Image (spheres, helix red, strand yellow):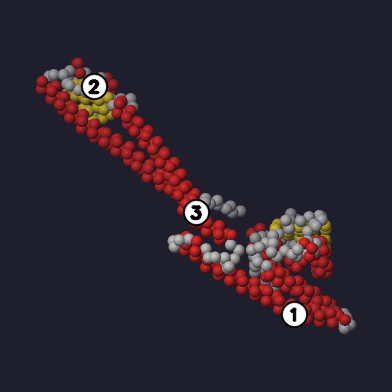
Amino acid sequence: MATERRRQPFARRIAVAFTLMTFVVSGTLSLGIVYVVHSVEKRLVSQTLDRTLTRVLDEYLRHGGAPRLDLNMQFFASDRPEYAIPEEFARARLGLGFSETGEGDNYWVYIREVNGQRYMLVEDQHEFEAHEKALFTILFCGFLLTVAGAWMLGRLMSKRIMAPVSRLAEQVRGLQRVPPAAPLAQDYADDEIGHLAEAFDNALSRLNLAMERERLFTSDVSHELRTPLMVIATSCELLETAGISGRGREQTGRIARAAEEMRNLVETFLTLARSHPDAASSGRIAMENGVTLVAVAREQCQRWTPGIEAKGLSFELSEEGRDTGRYNPALLSAVLGNLLRNALHYTERGWIRLALEDGGFRIEDSGAGIPEEEKDLVFQPFVRGARARGEGLGLGLSLVKRICAHQGWRIALDGLPEGGSRFRVRFR
């Protein structure tokens, strides 16, 4: 089962990107400063010690006098006991030229050989190391403060940058229909957000026009079908009173039942077409004009029991809870009728059960069932499962889903442990 990947809000991603950019730039700059400090330190100290040692050797070798040095410098020579090289420097086996030694590299050392004798100039760098450590501490703290500041600034800037987009999203989310509402684009500047708002205006206008055309078409067709359906129903009544018998009366009854079913379907389409699809409660009729769940269920049972029993199936209506709500008769009948038809169509042997509950109902069957991967697809229009039968168009469950969404009802589909399907509809 595929898991959905969680996505970060776009504003947070902007802040994270800004912070990462600052982290990389500040980190690179800080490392560059550390590298430059070490490079300059080595070069400058090496040059200074080289000049100082040259002066000391000139004085020492030519005049034999004691070298004049700063307090933090020391001179050592391998040919004079009074300037003997200390053991710690001798053990270090330092090469000619500049080097650092001592515990923690606390000494700068510059070595030169003249006539086979080794001369060494040592400078204590404890004070310099203290200053360098303080510099690096300040640099590190500055780096952390820069990253923290970048995060806060990124959060602030991302909110300001995303504010028009968020406002546009809220406006689009709150729209029920474009006209007669004012266009969105007039609230924004002539920039990318304004162009996006203009695109939303155009898309919503086309969508609203298409939905209006669909609503008018459904309303007109449904209205025009009422007259021929009335003629069919009246003709069936006249034929029944004409005294026909046998197979003719049976066929007339089938025509009458089909006409009644079509009439209920027409009423359903008219009810959906007359109300706005975005207002879940606009299609609901007043409480005093509605019907109860048990009344519609018993009516549907009378209609579908003959067909179910003719197929050799058992049918059960059970009242597991008492529902006191009142509902639109056309819409509730369409939901119950389509679900019972679906159960009859896909059940070859066994049983069908309609269970009434407090606040809803469920329809269960022992049929073929619906695979897990098709449970969301079967509610889409013109979609039939892999086990589809007959010449249906795949509109029954789509109509049920649309009615439930229109009325604010919830419909769920799951399988039964022993096989088959369960459709559960909750009114609240």
Counting other residues with Cα less than 10 Å from the Cα at mark 1, is it few (<14), some (14-19), or many (20 or more)? few
Counting other residues with Cα less than 10 Å from the Cα at mark 2, is it few (<14), some (14-19), or many (20 or more)? few
Residue 232 point in image, percent of width and height: 78, 80
Residue 283 point in image, percent of width and height: 70, 65
Which residue is at 64% across, 72% downward?
A: 215
Residue designated by label 1:
227
Identify which amino acid the numbered label 1 is placed on.
Answer: Thr
Identify which amino acid the numbered label 3 is placed on.
Answer: Ala
Residue designated by label 2:
71
Left/right of residue 103 with respect to residue 316 in the rendered view: left
Which residue is at 35% across, 31% downward?
A: 134
> Label 1 vs label 2: CA separation?
118 Å
Residue designated by label 3:
163
> Label 1 vs label 3: CA separation?
55 Å
Label 1 or label 3, whichever comes before in sequence order: 3
Residue 63 point in image, percent of width and height: 10, 20
Q: Is residue 23 above or below residue 340?
A: above
Label 1 or label 2, whichever comes before in sequence order: 2
Identify which amino acid the numbered label 2 is placed on.
Answer: Leu
- How many labels were placed on the picture? 3
Say which of marks 1 and 3 sits in front. 3
Q: In what element is the residue under mark 3? A: helix
Which residue is at 73% across, 58% downward?
A: 427
